[in-house]
Amino acid sequence: MVRTGGRVRYVHMSRWPQVAMVGTLTIALSWIAYSSVNYFLSDRIIASKEQEVRDARRAYRSLLTEVSSYQRKFASITHDLEENHSIMVGLVEQNSTLQQSLENVETKLQATETERNRVLSVRERLKGDLLAVENKMQTLVTRNFALKDNLSTTELDLQQAIVQRNQAMIAGTHMKGRISSLEADLRNLRRNEEETIERLTEQTLGNIEDVERLLSLAGLKVDKVLEASDFNVAQGGPFIAAKEGDDDRPGAALKNKLAALDYHLDRWSALRGVLGRMPLTVPVNNGYVTSRFGKRKDPFNKKWAMHYGLDYGGPKKSPIYVTAPGVVTYAGRKSRYGRMVEVDHGGGLKTIYGHLHKAVVKKGDKVTHRQKIGLMGSSGRSTGVHLHYEIRFKGKPLNPLKFIQAGRNVFQG
């Protein structure tokens, strides 16, 4: 029946069309109800999953903040946290992918029922992924606790290191004090050594000056005497110019003073050796000078001549003594000298003892100071019993009286 504007109309339908219409309406209503129910249920499920994803993202952000805090506090575990950060970034990307997939599933659910099954399968897979994410999150939490333990251990190690550093600083302070004390002792020792070296140098220079003055009194030139004694300072090597600051090195001044002292000691040693070989005493005990060194009238022809020695008169056969240690280089007759003895004292110095009655030594004998070498006589060109005494340096005759006077200064000193 259809009523329109107060008029009623009747539409007559057969049974089967009515059944078909009712069935169609029933199917349509059922489909609408079913689709509505599925639609609302899907929204709730998706909303629930989205909430879970948001919770997971919030948990991830919280965890990322905590991990970042750990990274700022402890740089020693940065590498492990970076790995965790990489894992979390991967999870975020996976969550983003899952969210996109869920949106695609929702669209497909609206489009077709067939896609619903695929959405369900995808949903199950997402559940598995979420479960894996939860497991990884749990693993990260466990690792974070382990990192906390490591951080605690690291803090203890740092505290111990600080204690050890403080102890080392205290020990270093004591050591600096000890070093300062040792440096002061070293300076005192160096100053004492320098004073000692200076005293030795002064004494050595004084001794050298005395010997050189004695040699000058004897008529000898120091350089020639040392040259004849083979004294030299052996030195050599390539020339390398000195650099500014070379004398500022530790001990440089002391080394220079030691080098100077060593040179002076060598010179003093050589001069002392020369002094030990110098004929500074008289060759007789009970004698007197009858003729001096120099120009005189010859006792035989009364003409002016040079006399290169000293003549000592005395009793016949009076003992004659060598005036310095040496080696006999001649013992026997020699023309004008008669019986004579010649002694080499080294360093170019020789003494000659002429007109002897007898020589009691022979060539090659080593004689000591004041050793008896002969007896006074009048052999050779002589006017009477006496000793002709000569001193020669490198063959050149020197005045024996100067040596005797120099010897008196030595023995009196």
Image (cartoon, rainbow, N blue to C red):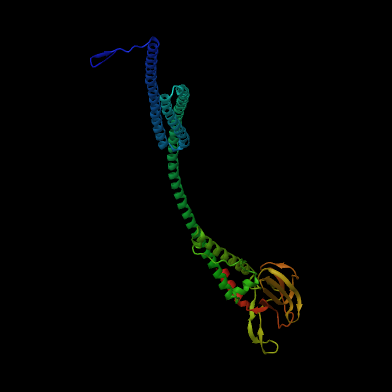
Quadrant into which the N terminus falls:
top left
Q: Picture coordinates of residue 70 (x, y %)? A: 41, 34
Pick the front one: 33 or 48: 33
Is residue 371 found left or right of 64 in the rendered image?
A: right
The tally of labels here is 0
Residue for point 24% across, 14% down: 7
Q: Residue 387, percent across and down?
A: 69, 77
> In screen coordinates, is 382 left or right of 19?
right
The residue that appears at 72% across and 67% down in the rendered structure is 366
Give above or below for 115 relative to 400: above
Identify whether 160 is placed above or below 53.
Answer: below
Front residue of 301/165: it is: 165
**Which of the 4 quarters of the picture holds residue 360?**
bottom right
Out of 321 and 166, give the one closest to the viewer.
166
Name the quadrant containing residue 286: bottom right
The residue lying at 45 percent from left, 44 percent from top is: 172
Whether residue 230 is visible here, answered yes or no, is yes
